[in-house]
Image (tube, helix red, strand yellow):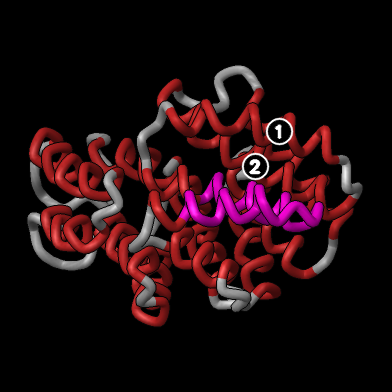
Amino acid sequence: MRSLSQLFRALIRPGNANQDPGSPALLQKAMDAVMAPYRDGNYQAALLAAEGLRPGGGKPAPYCFFRGTMLMHLGHYMEAEKWLRESISREKEPQQTAIGYSTLGQLLIHQQRYEESLQCFATSLRHWPDRGSTHRDMAEALLHRGHLSKAFQCAKMAIDKDSAAGALPPGAYGLNMSANLATLAWAVAASSREKEEVDRLVKEAMPLVADTQVRSITAQVHYHSARAYSELGDAGRSGHHYKEAARIDPGGLWGRAARAMSSGVAP
């Protein structure tokens, strides 16, 4: 979600080299048309609405990014990768380039291309070293690779970066920190099996994400919490969080991943 909000601000900023002709007011209206269905988990409607981000035609970087992101949520991974790579090739701003690489890395995780995803996250951090979300994404990839100590360090780094004064705009704090906490819970469970600490982190994450009303992030927090309890051998709690992720975001990235894990098929 932070990637979407960051690109929104870049899109409507006067003088953006990637911006199509059109007033900031019209571009903001087009972005609102994308964000409303995205928040509600209607990625097909958000994909269609993304066409409004190219008022002058062509393929500006924000349009390519949002098209690729919505296709990723819909599970069209090959097409999503094409558009995300296109957005990176067209982007000129370092922070938006970092977001593009990080989002591509997330897609690669869901394709089980973990080494490639780690390369994307490393490139993202070269463009924007203080972005907590990218450290969190790197932690997830490392967890999949079994590099547990390093995964814990990256997950902790995500919280440290996003806790810094002014690191996050007010609307993004709950979104980012809830996902950071759930990822750290997974890393703690996998590396040290400290049940009380896992409980604390999950308990702290849940009210933060509940306030956001963004289905994809809420489902992600439940999915990562489920992975934490699965590491602890707590089938009851892991099953609960998998069911919640699948219920909240049935047509999205994390809902699919939760259903796959519940059925015993790794995503």
Task: Determine the residue located farthest toward the front in the rendered image.
Answer: 236
Q: Residue at x 50, y 55 (%)?
A: 243
Amino acid under disc 2: Ala
Amino acid under disc 1: Leu
Secondary structure of the residue carrying numbered label 1: helix
Residues at badges 2 and 1 in contact (C-beta under 8 Å)?
yes
Q: Quadrant for residue 117, please give it.
A: bottom right
Residue at image mark 2: 182
Residue 264 position within the rendered picture, expressed as x and y whole percent measured from the top left: 62, 75
Task: Determine the residue located farthest toward the top in the rendered image.
Answer: 165
Query: Of 158 and 60, which appears nearest the observer?
Result: 158
Q: Residue at x 60, y 32 (%)?
A: 205
**Figure quadrant of the C terminus:** bottom right
Task: Determine the residue located farthest toward the bottom in the rendered image.
Answer: 78
Residue at image mark 1: 201
Residue 103 shows in this picture: yes
- Horizontal relation, residue 115 to residue 251: left or right: right
Query: Of 31 and 219, which appears nearest the observer?
Result: 219
* Residues packed near mark 2 inside 10 Å, few (<14), some (14 to 19) or many (20 plus): many
